[in-house]
Image (tube, rainbow, N blue to C red):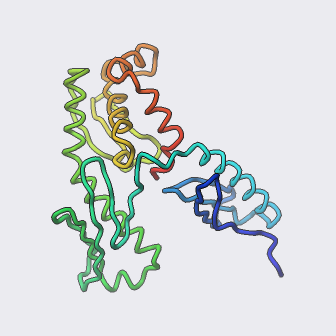
C-alpha cells in the first residue's frame, strides 16, 4: 500500500534552509519543537495518514512563521562532533572523540581541547545518533564546569555596579524551559544555553535575575530596576523572543 504522507526533510524559510525530522510517538498527542535549528515533529501513532498530513502541514506553517523572525547573525551554534568547535563568549573549544578500550565514557579538558573517550563496546552498540547524544552530554558537562568562573565574574561585576545585594549561589543549569531564575534563598540559576547567545543577551538575563533581589515580581517597579541597570534591555528581550528557541 502506498503511503499518502510525505515526510519533509527540509523547510525553506526565505534564504535559510532548516532540517526537518518526523518521528512517530507513543502518545496520543502530536507535538512540534525547534531544537538546535532543526524542526522536530512527533506524530501520534494513533493519527491516520490523512490526519498526519494535516498535522505536518499545520506544524510546518507554525515553524515557518517562527523561523521567519530568526536572525542568524550574532551567535554560532555549538558543533558537538569529532572535529567540531564550540564557541562561547570567552573561549573556543575543539572537540576530539576517541574510541578506547575503557569501560566507562569520560571526558577531559586539555589546553582548549575537549577529549571525549568512548568505550569501544559501548560505542559499537549505539547508532551514530546515539553516540552523538553521549558526546554532547559529556562535552556540555565539561564546558559547564569550566565556564562557572566566568558566570560568577559577570554576576559579581553586575551586582557590584548596580545592585550591591547578597547572592548565595550562582550556577549554570541545563534548563530548557527558562533562561534564568532567582529563588527567595538568593540562589541564582542561569541557562547554560546562554553561553551561545550574544554577550549582551547573556548579561541581560543576569541583570534580570539580579533585579529580583530588589523586586521579587515583574511589576513596573521591577522593570524600572532592570532599566536602571541596562537601559537597552528591550533589545535583548526581543532577541530572546525571536532567536532564543534556536539555542536548544
Residue at horizontal 37 percent and vertical 70 percent from the top: 81
Looking at this view, is 210 or 121 the one in front? 210
Count of numbered circles on the image: 0
Residue at horizontal 64 percent and vertical 52 percent from the top: 14
In this rendering, the answer to whether 86 lies above or below 67 is below
Looking at this view, is 219 or 207 the one in front? 207
Quadrant housing the N terminus? bottom right
Q: Quadrant of residue 57?
A: bottom right
Q: Residue 33 location, x and y as percent?
A: 58, 53
Residue at horizontal 20 percent and vertical 62 percent from the top: 112
Looking at this view, is 82 or 173 the one in front? 82
Task: Classify residue 71 as left or right of residue 173.
Answer: right
Q: Residue 191 location, x and y as percent?
A: 37, 44
Residue at horizontal 41 percent and vertical 68 percent from the top: 133
Q: Quadrant of residue 102?
A: bottom left
Q: Residue 66 location, x and y as percent?
A: 61, 45
Q: Residue 134 location, x and y as percent?
A: 37, 69
In this rendering, the answer to whether 209 lies above or below 29 is above
Amino acid at each position: 500500500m502506498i503511503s499518502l504522507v510525505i515526510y519533509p526533510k527540509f523547510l525553506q524559510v526565505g534564504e535559510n534552509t532548516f532540517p526537518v525530522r518526523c518521528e512517530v510517538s507513543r502518545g496520543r498527542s502530536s507535538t512540534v519543537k525547534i531544537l538546535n535549528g532543526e524542526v522536530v515533529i512527533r506524530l501520534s501513532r494513533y493519527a491516520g495518514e490523512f490526519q498526519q498530513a494535516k498535522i505536518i502541514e499545520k506544524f510546518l506553517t507554525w515553524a515557518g512563521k517562527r523561523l521567519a523572525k530568526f536572525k542568524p547573525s550574532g551567535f554560532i551554534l555549538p558543533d558537538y562532533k569529532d572535529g567540531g568547535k564550540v564557541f562561547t563568549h570567552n573561549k573556543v573549544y575543539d572537540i576530539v572523540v576517541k574510541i578506547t578500550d575503557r569501560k566507562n565514557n569520560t571526558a577531559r579538558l586539555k589546553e582548549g581541547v575537549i577529549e571525549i573517550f568512548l568505550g569501544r563496546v559501548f560505542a559499537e552498540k549505539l547508532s551514530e545518533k546515539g553516540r552523538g547524544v553521549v558526546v554532547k552530554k559529556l562535552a556540555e558537562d565539561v564546558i559547564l564546569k569550566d565556564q562557572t568562573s566566568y558566570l560568577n565574574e559577570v554576576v559579581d561585576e553586575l551586582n557590584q555596579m548596580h545592585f550591591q545585594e547578597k547572592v548565595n549561589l550562582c550556577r549554570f543549569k541545563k534548563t530548557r524551559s527558562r533562561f534564568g531564575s532567582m529563588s527567595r534563598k538568593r540562589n541564582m540559576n542561569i541557562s547554560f544555553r546562554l553561553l551561545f547567545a550574544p554577550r549582551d543577551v547573556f548579561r541581560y538575563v543576569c541583570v534580570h535575575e539580579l533585579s529580583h533581589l530588589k523586586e521579587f515580581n515583574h511589576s513596573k517597579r521591577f522593570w524600572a530596576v532592570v532599566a536602571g541597570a541596562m537601559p537597552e534591555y528591550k533589545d535583548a528581550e526581543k532577541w530572546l523572543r525571536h532567536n532564543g528557541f534556536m539555542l536548544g
